[in-house]
Image (spheres, rainbow, N blue to C red):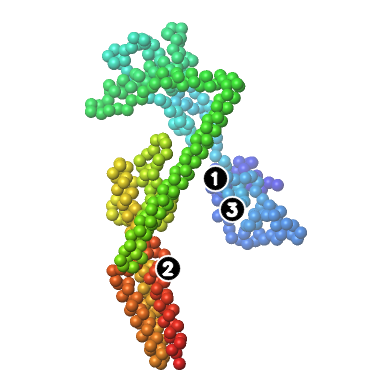
Amino acid sequence: MTTGADVRDILELTGGENDGPISKKDLINSDKKKSKKSTETLTFKRPEGMHREVYALLYSDKKDAPPLLPSDTTQGYRTVKAKLGCKKVRPWKWMPFTNPARRDGAIFHHWRRVAEEGKDYPFARFNKTVQIPVYSEQEYQVHLHDDGWTKAETDHLFDLCKRFDLRFVVVHDRYDHQQYRKRSVEDLKERYYSICGKLTKVRAASGTEPKIYIFDAGHERRRKEQLEKLFNRTPEQVAEEEYLIQELRKIETRKKEREKKAQDLQKLIKAADTTTELRRAEKRVSKKKLPQKRETEKPAVPETAGIKFPDFKSAGVTLRSQRMKLPSSVGQKKIKAIEQILMEQGVDLNPMPTEEIVQMFNELRSDLVLLYELKQAHSNCEYEQQMLRHRYEALLKAGSGGVCGGITAAALAATTLSGELNATNTKEQIIDVVGAPLTPNSRKRRESASSSSSIKKVKKP
């Protein structure tokens, strides 16, 4: 069914607002020009029994008719409908053009819009050529002369390199082997890059060192020979190589197992040595009779304090930096504490592993771990002292509201706590370096606290 616009277009009658050529905006954004009355008058309801998906294929949300042809933009999950008016399309013309990248002046023809007539061919910008150096007669005689190459043959080589953009396989195929000597691809590459290097060195400014590309023709020939031998292998040779690779893997696994067993044995020997040394030290301490009892009860710094770095006694070559590696027994908290202290003091975390530096660095970290453990033990002691102080204040409050029994209990608790504080302030106090929750002082405090509470219960009326 034709409309009035179609009739006017057929009869080539002009008039109206839609006589100009149609554009892309007219096809896509014509919904904005629609009046409000048209949207209000068009109301369609989905028939009963028709599914929503089928009805959505017939009409859109704006109740428009189904599209006649697809467009190139999308809104949501639907394709925007192309709006066709009575405007004229942009005209196209069969016109000639020349490619600026060609030098032979060839003329071609293609379809193009009339508005783009006279413009350059757009694909000419993709024509990239390699800059081939050009030398003069004097430069060749002074710097580029070679007994194995004549100037005519060198000119022929550079002409082919310029024509085929340094595609040396094509250059070797087009090379005139009848007029000149038979050359290989490596010979052509070597001659070309040697000339380029000499020209860059000669033409470089004084005081500068230019970068020169050096082509190793011998290495390239050996590489190609190896590839050719690899390609010409027989199936028996391939199977033999696979068998040798499997045997090599087995040897490596057996070597790793032997090294692991040697390390385990070294650990066992080290543990046995430490246990024997500890037993000898205990025997020496037991033989000595000290006059004071407190001095016998005073423990020295435990063996677990600090870091015990392993000794590498296995056969083979080892790096000295492995002695600086922290053992797995050191926890992550201690490692982070060590790194933080070293960074605060401005010490490098990975110094140069000389013999003296490794020994001193390991001793420093061992002392830092000992300091960290002492700080933990000190904080635990302070926590216990604060807890006892709170208990003492609670006992005072409970005794102030009671009778004589409560007062005596508070006095007893006060004397007990004062005795404990005096005991802790003496020089001969016992310190648990490891920071265990039940130190000798904490056991005494708990026993005294339990005895005071029992006395308070007995004396209460």
Q: Residue at x 27, y 25 (%)?
A: 204
Q: Position of residue 125 (x, y in %)?
A: 44, 31
Where residue 236 appears, as percent x and y from the top left, is 60, 21
x, y percentage for residue 435? 39, 64
Q: Is residue 137 left or right of residue 16?
A: left
CA neighbours of label 2 inside 10 A, class few (<14), some (14 to 19), many (20+): few
Amino acid on which disc 1 is placed: Lys
The residues bearing labels 1 and 3 have C-alpha atoms spaced at a distance of 20 Å
Q: Which residue is mark 1?
A: 24
Image quadrant where residue 400 sits: bottom left
Answer above or below: position of 428 versus 142: below
Q: Which residue corresponds to mark 2?
A: 438
Quickly name the residue at label 3: 76
* Identity, as a three-letter code, of the amino acid under mark 2: Leu
Closer to us: mark 3 or mark 2?
Answer: 2
Which quarter of the picture shows residue 399?
Answer: bottom left
Q: Nearer the viewer, mark 1 or mark 2?
A: 2
Locate the C terminus by quadrant. bottom left
Relative to 399, say whether 20 is above or below: above
Front position in the image: 73 or 195: 195
Q: Give whichever of 412, 358 is nearer the camera.
A: 412
